[in-house]
């Protein structure tokens, strides 16, 4: 892949406004950082110059300059980073896990960010994975959250008791011989209905029902007001229910009474629904997602 | 017998059983992509891919839940009476009420017999407008409590059986729990919202009719009354840009062409709303920057100015970068027509104009 052509005048302009010089970052290094960022964002595509310019202007350039300077070993930049972002990182760690284990992760992150004092610090520092598409604060929170969850999941896998709890199969034997069939029909209909939702709607449902996130938190993440998140959830759920019932009528020729029986049986024995298997984890359906939301910001 | 609630409860039970428990894989967005998604920086096809993945990957959903918990504290929505427009309204309503009293008097036939009872009767519709004059700034404690209760209660539509969530009060759970699934869900919600938004205009509405009324009944050459100060306060509320006002008069609010998005400078920091002022989110500024005024010509472009030649600009509605404006000194006002064109006035009266986003100034 040939490197993207970046207009020298554009780079000079954003270099001037990014405070890169204050950290002693050379224009060449700053250009390299932008180059890496654009290469990832455009993923091998060759965008037109105006598109590149828009992209460059959309970046968090000051943060990118700071990160590039830290990666390059500028002490001034590093001191500034530690002063400005240590509180951010610690606050995030305490929010994830008040018992303090996330703080340990946060501390270990510093070593990786600093590049472990290797001679080839530029290559080793985690900062080289910062591309300015998000703010530095968001990026740090994202790293910390991923590390924390991966550590937690790894330790859970070593814990057989929890594993069986999570995987606990339904032990109830339905008294009504028809019930199992009805539940299966309902589950199939629900799976199809879930797969037909837009990814955003499905994600909202999962965050609410499975991860028990509050409406306020869901709203924050989606850039919506809490009331909007609530309305969207209610709407998705209504669509889902109507779609399930439509499918039961169409595919199984169930009438109202039979559908009511399906719901009742499902209440007794819901059983797990594997979203990854239902929807297809490979993203092939992504384009087919029925997006009912406004696009853009 | 199947009760009408069964389908809803069954659906909830089924939805809670959704899982996507698989190990992290190369499909999972890396933290950079994840952060960019969260900051809304991905172009649409990449965003769709990430969201599709997130909607089916239990590990990434867990990450997202943890990540959301780390969001910087959103400053609590400021109580109504601290919101900027109410601050302006208080003197306006007080002035309007006073003007009303004055206007009513000559209207009474010019006689000096001005029975107190008739005053009361005439002014009764204005009683709301009077109140702020009598009780400056703070509403009575019970009103405050009311407002707080409303804040806490208003918007949540908690789907049923999730009772342990602090932020998800049960008030609107009826919607989701409801036996009337075909009905618009948001009856209770909209009611709650209506109540919430009604708090604001309640006093505004009281003030609004007062001014024309005063104007109508005022004699040809009214003495300089409080009506003048009310009129003077009007444009100030709109402009609200000068540093003294930022210091003395609470937040400076900057509107954008998008009514949902506004910015405000408050306590030396910057906040943004994307829902017309219902919630405000703190926006990080470069260290040490304390802007005092700004102008936002479009949804994502905002120029901020402050003392010692401080000029900041965002073109993405989120991150601000410093713009160099040589030899400017303290700056007092800014007009902007877009990301590239802006005119800034310094405290000594000089103006600086740019047509290239601040690279050069004339």
Image (cartoon, rainbow, N blue to C red):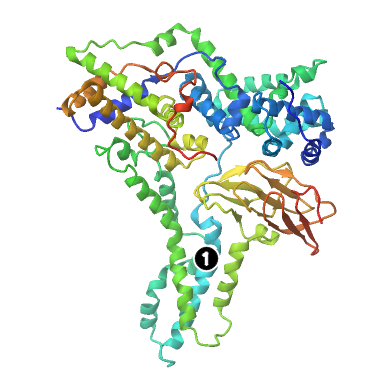
Residue B164 x %, y %? 39, 31
Establish if A28 lies above or below B82.
above
| Image quadrant assignment for residue A78 | top right
Residue placed farthest to the bottom in the image?
B111
Between A173 and B338, the one nearer to me in the picture: B338
Residue A262 visible? The answer is: yes
**Residue at the (46%, 73%) spot, across then down:** B210
Residue under circle 1? B90
The C terminus of chain B sits in image quarter: bottom right
Q: Nearer the viewer, residue A239 or B133?
A: A239
Quadrant in the picture for residue B34: top right
- Please, is residue A223 above or below residue B92 in the view? above
Left or right of B266 in this view: B154: left
* Residue B83 occupies quadrant: bottom right
Mark 1, Cα crowd under 10 Å, few <14 / some 14-19 / many 20+, is: many
In the rendered image, residue B65, in percent from the top left (x then y), is placed at 50, 27
- Residue A161 spot, x, y in % from top left: 43, 8
Q: Is residue B130 visible?
A: no
User: Going by the image, does B179 lie left or right of A208?
Assistant: left
Chain letter of the residue beneath label 1 in the structure image: B
Q: For the residue labelled by badge 1, is the local secondary structure a helix, a strand or a loop?
A: helix
Q: Which residue is pictured at 27% across the width and 21% down the height?
A: A186
Name, please, the residue furthest toward the left.
B1
Judged left or right of residue B166, residue A169 is left
Considering depth in this image, is B297 or A151 the residue closer to the camera?
A: B297
Q: Position of residue A255 (x, y in %)?
A: 17, 27
Q: Quadrant of the N terminus of chain B?
A: top left
Which residue is rendered at x = 79% and y = 47% of the image?
Answer: B359
Say how many tags the image has: 1
- Residue at 75% across / 58% down in the picture? B344
């Amino acid at each position: 892949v040939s490197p993207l052509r970046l207009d020298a005048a554009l780079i000079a302009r954003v270099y001037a406004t990014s405070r890169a010089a204050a950290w002693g970052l050379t224009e060449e290094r700053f250009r390299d950082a932008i180059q890496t960022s654009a290469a990832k964002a455009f993923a091998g595509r060759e965008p037109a110059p105006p598109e590149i310019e828009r992209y460059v202007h959309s970046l968090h350039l000051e943060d990118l300059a700071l990160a590039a300077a830290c990666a390059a070993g500028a002490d001034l930049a590093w001191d500034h980073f530690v002063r400005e972002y240590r509180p951010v990182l610690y606050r995030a760690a305490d929010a994830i896990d008040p018992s303090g284990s996330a703080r340990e992760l946060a501390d270990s992150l510093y070593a990786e960010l600093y590049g472990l004092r290797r001679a080839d610090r530029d290559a080793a520092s985690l900062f080289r994975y910062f591309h300015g598409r998000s703010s530095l604060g968001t990026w740090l929170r994202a790293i910390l959250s991923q590390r924390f969850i991966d550590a937690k999941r790894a330790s859970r896998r070593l814990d057989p008791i929890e594993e069986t709890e999570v995987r606990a199969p339904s032990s109830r034997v339905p008294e009504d011989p028809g019930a199992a069939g009805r539940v299966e029909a309902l589950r199939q209909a629900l799976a199809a209905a879930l797969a037909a939702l837009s990814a955003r709607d499905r994600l909202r449902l999962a965050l609410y029902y499975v991860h028990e996130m509050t409406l306020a938190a869901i709203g924050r993440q989606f850039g919506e007001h809490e009331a909007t998140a609530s309305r969207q959830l209610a709407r998705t759920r209504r669509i889902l229910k109507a779609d399930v019932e439509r499918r039961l009528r169409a595919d199984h020729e169930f009438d109202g009474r039979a559908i009511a029986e399906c719901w009742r049986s499902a209440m007794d024995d819901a059983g797990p629904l594997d979203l990854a298997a239902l929807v297809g984890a490979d993203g092939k359906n992504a384009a087919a997602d029925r997006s009912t939301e406004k696009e853009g910001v | 017998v199947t009760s009408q609630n069964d389908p809803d409860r069954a659906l909830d039970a089924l939805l809670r059983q959704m899982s996507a428990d698989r190990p992290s894989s190369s499909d999972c967005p890396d933290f950079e992509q994840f952060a960019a998604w969260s900051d809304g920086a991905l172009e649409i096809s990449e965003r769709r891919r990430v969201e599709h993945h997130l909607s089916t990957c239990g590990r990434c959903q867990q990450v997202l839940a943890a990540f959301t918990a780390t969001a910087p504290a959103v400053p609590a929505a400021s109580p109504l009476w601290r919101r900027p427009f109410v601050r302006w309204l208080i003197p306006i309503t007080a002035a309007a009420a006073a003007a009303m009293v004055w206007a009513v008097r000559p209207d009474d036939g010019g006689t000096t017999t001005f029975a107190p009872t008739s005053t009361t009767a005439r002014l009764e519709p204005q009683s709301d407008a009077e109140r702020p004059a009598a009780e400056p700034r703070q509403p009575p404690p019970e009103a405050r409590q009311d407002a707080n209760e409303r804040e806490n209660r208003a918007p949540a539509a908690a789907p049923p059986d999730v009772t342990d969530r602090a932020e998800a009060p049960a008030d609107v759970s009826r919607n989701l729990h409801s036996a009337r699934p075909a009905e618009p869900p948001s009856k209770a919600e909209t009611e709650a919202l209506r109540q919430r938004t009604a708090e604001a205009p309640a006093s505004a509405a009281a003030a609004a009719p007062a001014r024309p009324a005063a104007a109508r009944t005022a004699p040809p050459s009214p003495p300089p009354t409080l009506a003048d100060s009310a009129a003077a306060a009007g444009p100030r509320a709109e402009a609200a840009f000068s540093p003294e006002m930022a210091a003395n008069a609470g937040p400076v609010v900057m509107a954008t062409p998008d009514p949902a998005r506004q910015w405000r400078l408050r306590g030396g920091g910057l906040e943004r709303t994307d829902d017309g002022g219902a919630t405000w989110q703190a926006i990080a500024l470069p260290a040490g920057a304390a802007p005092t005024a700004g102008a936002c010509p479009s949804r994502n472009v905002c120029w901020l100015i402050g003392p010692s030649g401080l000029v900041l600009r965002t073109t993405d509605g989120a991150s601000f970068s410093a713009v160099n404006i040589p030899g400017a000194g303290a700056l007092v006002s800014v007009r902007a027509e877009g990301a590239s064109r802006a005119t800034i006035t310094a405290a000594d009266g000089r103006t600086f104009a740019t047509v290239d986003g601040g690279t050069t100034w004339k």
